[in-house]
């Protein structure tokens, strides 16, 4: 079991590096993809549903998506952007990030793990997260 886990983690790390999103690695390693399917009526688009857990001390680097991200905070906690005061990301908050707009860029502070449900409607074949603007 340990060997299989190590193999899966190695594959994930290589794929993340390949897509140029290594800065989002901490986030990717805690993301559990629940479902992925083509978006009917929109060739080249897909829908990806995931649960992400970001632990105290973890960073969520600034990033963007090649499509729209909608989310819901299942379990909130304190976050600290690099250049702003810490604030509470409250349980029950909804999130909506539009195509190619940078967001994130914070560290989880305090003692609570943040848990998010996200749905991405994105370009098929592109990385789910990207950290470098075009």
Image: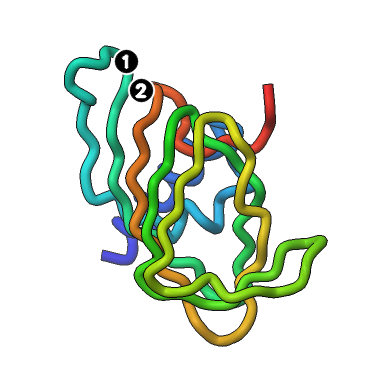
Q: Residue furthest right?
A: 83
Q: Residue furthest bottom?
A: 111
Label 1: which residue? 44
81 relative position to 101: left or right: right
Task: Check contact, mark 2 vs mark 1: CB within 8 A.
Answer: yes
Q: Residue at x 52, y 77 (%)?
A: 77
Residue 35 picture quarter: top left
Residue closer to the observer: 29 or 54: 54
Distance, label 2 to label 1, CA atoms, is 5 Å
Disc 1: CA contacts within 10 A as few (<14), some (14-19) or many (>=20): few
| Residue occupying image coordinates x 52% and y 73% | 55
Q: Position of residue 119 (x, y in %)?
A: 33, 45
Residue 45, placed above or below residue 13: above
Element assignment for label 1: loop
**Horizontal side of residue 53 vs 46, given as left or right:** right
Q: Which residue is mark 2?
A: 124
């Amino acid at each position: 079991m340990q060997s299989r886990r190590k193999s899966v983690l190695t594959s994930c790390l290589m794929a993340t590096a390949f897509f140029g999103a290594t800065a989002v690695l901490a986030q990717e390693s805690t993301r559990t993809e629940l479902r992925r399917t083509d978006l009917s009526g929109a060739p080249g688009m897909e829908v990806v549903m995931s649960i992400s857990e970001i632990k105290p001390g973890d960073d969520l680097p600034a990033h963007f998506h090649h499509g729209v991200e909608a989310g819901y905070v299942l379990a909130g906690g304190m976050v600290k952007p690099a250049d702003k005061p810490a604030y509470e990301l409250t349980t029950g908050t909804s999130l909506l990030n539009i195509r190619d707009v940078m967001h994130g860029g914070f560290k989880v502070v305090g003692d609570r793990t943040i848990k998010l449900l996200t749905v991405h409607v994105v370009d098929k074949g592109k990385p789910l997260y990207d950290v470098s603007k075009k």
